[in-house]
Image: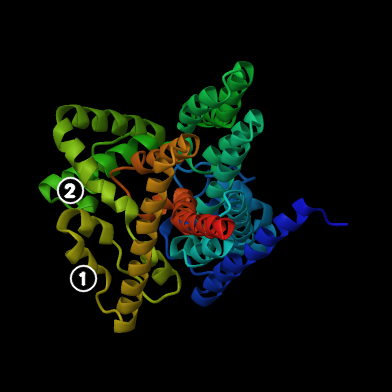
């Protein structure tokens, strides 16, 4: 006999199939093996070599990539090869949709609205149909948050540790979550200590691995160069009009030694430049903030082979503005592709408007325990990659925007029901 709880879960479980099937169709439409993003090839290479030395004897630089996503791909790689991303990403996308729909059910939100926004999320459909790490990362991040709010601190920390192993972007999220847990669960001091330790255990183990093989106790050989090439590079491109690739090429000539040594040198160069040019750096970072809200239709158009080969659009956007970036991206494109993009952007802008309205309603209702963690989560993923922001960095928290966007619909419906109930009682 099925109890009420099982019936309630069955609705999100069925609805979650819709966006998952649409992601599968996206992969089929663009071609199962088509990978328009350069990172995808590296992940697939590492997956195939996961038990043979990981990045060793490959074209991927030593210590460049975190091991989490290649490890997931390796579970299917020997049977599916370059198609291993399909079961990993599609399963993760399905469970993301299921969890978000279940959240909506608990918030008493209309599940049809959540399903619709998940189904037309061009960015998540693209990433689910591509060998990129954002979708598995988002799933473990969601599990981390769900377990944390339910007071399963140790389990939550382990989910966060796996998320960091997939994408280092969440490496410092444990600080915010520990502060939130201390506020929410003040009596769980011992559990909080275990939370901090468990959240960092896998990161520490990978640092030990890198030290044992490369004699560098570091999680990645990419962090310093990321700061130099993207954050400082963006500031230089913004203020001096120097193309990003030109800045990167000239700066690379100043680095020497192995990958980790170059990364350390890049960290020092970036820190020195930021210290000496902080006002210029701060202005460049602030000017990059709107790119977090960049529409995600462009990646989808590339994935289904409507538009391709227009790399460097983000660099043009940074240096020359939106009009020049639009012209660069849509050069030699069919008119219908442009109009489809315009239509999607209109719907996307409306979603953002509804999300802002939902946030304002929650603030008006003084639901601080809901608003504060959501704002901290969005703020973290907004600020951490600043200087290299595009739609992909928003995807791990896009589900928050979806819940906020649907909230006004639920709020208005509740108000109407309340008003009708009051009128009925008076009559």
Q: Is residue 234 left or right of residue 150?
A: left
What residue lies at 66% left-to-right and 32% top-to-bottom?
152
Quarter of the N terminus within the rendering: bottom right
Q: CA distance from mark 1 to mark 2?
A: 19 Å
Which residue is tagged 1?
Answer: 327
Q: Position of residue 286 (x, y in %)?
A: 22, 42
Q: Is residue 162 visible?
A: no
Q: Position of residue 30 (x, y in %)?
A: 49, 74
- Of residues 124 and 74, the one nearer the viewer is 124
Q: Which mark is residue 64?
A: none
Residue 103 higher or lower than 304, as above or below: above
Q: Residue furthest right?
A: 1
Q: Is residue 266 left or right of residue 274?
A: right
Q: Which mark is residue 237?
A: 2
Q: Position of residue 266 (x, y in %)?
A: 30, 34
Q: Position of residue 220 (x, y in %)?
A: 45, 36
What residue lies at 30% left-to-right and 68% top-to-bottom?
310
């Amino acid at each position: 006999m099925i109890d009420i709880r099982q019936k309630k879960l069955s609705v999100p479980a069925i609805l979650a199939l819709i966006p998952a099937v649409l992601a599968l169709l996206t992969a089929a439409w663009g071609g199962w093996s088509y990978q328009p993003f350069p990172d995808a090839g590296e992940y697939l290479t590492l997956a195939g070599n996961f038990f043979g030395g990981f990045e060793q004897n490959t074209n991927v630089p030593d210590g460049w990539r975190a091991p989490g996503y290649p490890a997931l791909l390796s579970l299917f790689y020997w049977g599916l090869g370059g198609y291993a991303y399909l079961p990993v990403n599609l399963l993760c996308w399905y469970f993301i949709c299921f969890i978000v729909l279940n959240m909506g059910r608990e918030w008493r939100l209309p599940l049809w609205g959540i399903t619709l926004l998940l189904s037309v999320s061009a960015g998540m459909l693209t990433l689910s149909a591509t060998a990129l790490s954002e979708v598995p990362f988002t799933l473990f991040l969601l599990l981390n948050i769900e377990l944390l709010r339910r007071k399963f601190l140790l389990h939550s920390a382990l989910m966060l540790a796996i998320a960091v192993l997939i994408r280092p972007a969440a490496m410092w999220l444990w600080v915010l979550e520990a502060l939130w847990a201390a506020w929410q669960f003040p009596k769980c001091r011992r559990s909080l200590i275990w939370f901090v330790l468990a959240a960092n255990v896998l990161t520490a183990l990978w640092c030990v691995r890198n030290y044992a093989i490369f004699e560098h106790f570091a999680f990645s050989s990419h962090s310093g160069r990321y700061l130099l090439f993207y954050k400082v590079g963006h500031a230089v491109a913004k203020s001096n009009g120097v193309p990003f690739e030109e800045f990167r090429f000239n700066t690379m000539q100043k680095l020497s030694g192995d990958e980790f040594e170059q990364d350390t040198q890049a960290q020092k160069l970036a820190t020195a430049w930021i210290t000496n040019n902080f006002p210029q750096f701060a202005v460049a970072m602030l000017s990059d903030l709107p790119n977090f809200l960049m529409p995600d239709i462009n990646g989808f158009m590339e994935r289904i082979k409507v538009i391709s080969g227009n790399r460097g659009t983000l660099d043009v956007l940074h240096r020359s503005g939106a009009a020049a970036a639009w012209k660069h991206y849509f050069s030699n494109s069919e008119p219908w592709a442009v109009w489809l993009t315009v239509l999607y952007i209109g719907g996307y802008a409306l979603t953002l408007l509804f999300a802002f309205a939902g946030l304002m309603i929650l603030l008006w209702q003084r639901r601080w325990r809901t608003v504060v963690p959501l704002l901290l989560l969005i703020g973290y993923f907004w600020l951490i990659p600043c200087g290299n922001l595009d739609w992909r960095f928003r995807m791990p928290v896009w589900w928050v925007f979806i819940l906020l966007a649907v909230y006004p619909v639920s709020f208005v419906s509740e108000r109407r029901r309340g008003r009708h109930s009051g009128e009925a009682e008076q009559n």
